[in-house]
Image (spheres, helix red, strand yellow):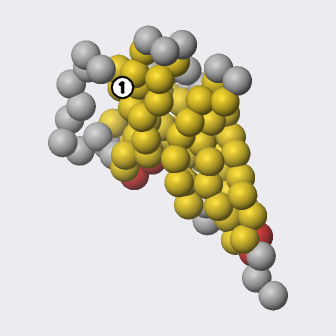
Amino acid sequence: MRKIKAYQLPCVLKKAFITPLPAGIEILCVQVIKGMPVMSGVIDDADENERDRVFRIYGNDEEIKENAGIYVGSFVISGKVSLHLFDITPLVRHGPDLIVPR
């Protein structure tokens, strides 16, 4: 029988970051928990193999290009800074210390 699990992973507060996630995860939202942004999603336990995903955070004053990636959600840090998280995995090629637009 198939099982669906909830999954949470803290976001890195950098302009762009790479993080391993289960390949089949469906990211539902990003929210602030105890002062840190956290991605929440669901995963079919049959598809837990990890793969790197690349994310980009934009601030309110930054231009967000038309092909910015897949919008994940917006969140507010310390009641002051509004940030917007995009999954840019399909738009880049990357290595351990490199994120290059395709």
Q: Foreground: 101 or 28?
A: 28
Residue pointed to by mark 1: 58
The x, y position of residue 26, in whole percent, is 56, 60
**Rendered-image quadrant of the C terminus:** top left
Q: Residue 20 lies in what quarter of the image? A: top right
Q: In this view, does 14 lie to the left or right of 51?
A: left
* Helix, strand or loop under label 1: strand
Q: In this view, does 53 lie to the left or right of 10?
A: left
The x, y position of residue 76, in whole percent, is 47, 23
- In this view, which residue lies farthest toward the right? 1
**Rendered-image quadrant of the N terminus:** bottom right
- Kind of residue indicated by mark 1: Tyr
Residue 1 appears in the rendering: yes
Q: Residues within 10 Å of mark 1 (few under 14, many from 20)?
A: some
Q: Which residue is drawn at 54% across and 30% down?
A: 17
Q: Foreground: 63 or 95?
A: 63
- In this view, which residue lies farthest toward the bottom? 1
The x, y position of residue 24, in whole percent, is 61, 65
| Image position of 68 with respect to 6: above or below | above
The x, y position of residue 36, in whole percent, is 64, 24
Residue 50 appears in the rendering: no
Q: In this view, does 36 lie to the left or right of 85?
A: right
